[in-house]
Amino acid sequence: MTLDTQTGRDIAHAAALLQSAEVVAMPTETVYGLAGNALDADAVLKIFKAKNRPFFDPLIVHTHAISEIGRYVKGIPGQLRPLMELFMPGPLTVLLPRTGLIPDLVTSGLDRVAFRIPAHPLALSLLRSIDFPLAAPSANPFGYISPTTAAHVQAQLGGVIPYILDGGPCQVGIESTIIGMEGDTVVVYRLGGLAIEQIERHTGSLKVMSHSSSDPAGPGMLESHYAPRTPLIVGDIAALMLEHSGSKIAVLSFSKKYDVPRNYILSPQGDIDMAAKRLFAGMRELDATDADLIIAESLPMGGLGRAVNDRLQRAAAK
Ligand code: TXA
Ligand code: MG
C-alpha cells in the first residue's frame, strides 16, 4: 500500500499519529529520525519494516528530559550523569541499563538501552506533547546515507510513512556520539556530532571502540553504513583522479575546488563543522549524478573531522 506522505510543521498531527502507533519522520539537530512509540512493540516493528532494517540493529530512544530517561533505566552511572547534564539536549547518546518497560525489539535483546535528548525545538515540542519516549533510527532505508533535510526523507520514505515533520536542514549533520560504560571506564561506541575532545575535557582520555562488520549487535555498528550507491574511495584526490582518469569521476572535496564537472565542496572556508553539516547532502548530490565513482578526501582529525572521516570510511567500505 502506498501512502500519501505529507510534510509540514504540525506537531499536534504528528503527536496524534504517534499516539495511534504510526511512525513519523522527525527533525533533530543531527539527522532526521523515523520515530515511533518506544514502549509499543507494534509501533517499533513499523520502524524496522519502513527502513528494511535487520532486527539485530538496536534503536536509539528519544526523550525531552534526563528525569524522563530515569523512568526507563535501572540507574545512571556516576561518570555518565555529569556528561548528560552538560551535553543533553545535544548530539550525545548514552547506553544505560534498561528496565522491562523498554521492549526487546528496541534493544535487539541487549540489556542496555540507548537514550538521547535531541537539541531541536520541534523535536522537543513533539516529545513534550506525548507521554511516551520515541524510538528513532535515522530516517533512511537501511545501509543508505542518513537524511539531513525533509526532502531527503521524502525522496526515500515517501509513500511508506504518513508524515514528515519538517524542521529545516539539520544543524550538526552527522549522527550522535554514542557512549557507555565498560566497568569503570567511559567508552565511545560511535564517533558523532559531539567531538571526543569535548567529552575528554571532563573524563580524560577515552577509549574508542572500533566498528566491525562481523559483530553488529555489539555496539560497534556495521562497517558498511552511510553508503551511496556509487562506489566511493577515500584518498588523495589528485592522485585518485589520475589513477581513475578513464572513469566518470565525482569529487567530494573538503575546501578546494577541482576542475571536474562534478565537484561538491564541503566547506570552501575550510570549516570542519560546516563540512560535517553538508557531508550527507554532498554524498547524495554526487550519488545522483551519472558518475561511476566518487573520490573523497579525509578531513583534518580535530573536532568533528574524526567523525566525518569515520563516515567516509564506512561509505567506502561497501
Ligand atoms: O543522531 C542520532 O543518533 C540519530 C537521530 C535520529 O537521533 N539516530 C541514529 O540512529 O543515528 P541509528 O538507528 O541510525 O543508529 C543507532 C545505533 C545502532 O546502530 C547501534 O550501533 C547503536 O545506535 N545502539 C542503539 N541501541 C543500542 C544498544 N542498546 N546497545 C548498543 N548500541 C546501540
Ligand atoms: Mg542510521
Image (cartoon, rainbow, N blue to C red):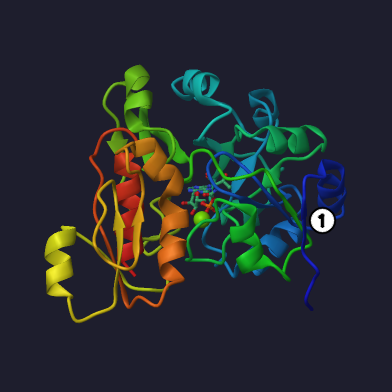
Q: Residue furthest bottom?
A: 246
Name the kind of residue labelled 1 in the image: Ala
- Residue 218 place in picture, x, y as percent: 42, 53
- Residue 44 place in picture, x, y as percent: 70, 57
Q: Is residue 74 above or below residue 232?
A: above
Residue 214 shows in this picture: no
Is residue 279 or residue 270 the one in the foreground? 270
Q: Is residue 93 above or below residue 197?
A: below
Q: Is residue 284 above or below residue 304?
A: below
Label 1 packing within 10 angstroms: few (<14), some (14-19), many (20+): many
Residue for point 70% across, 45% down: 134
Q: Is residue 151 above or below residue 306?
A: below
State left or right for residue 48 relative to residue 265. right
- Residue 189 place in picture, x, y as percent: 39, 43
Residue for point 86% across, 48% down: 13
Is residue 160 or residue 99 the one in the foreground? 160
Q: Which residue is mark 1?
A: 21
Is residue 238 or residue 136 the one in the foreground? 238
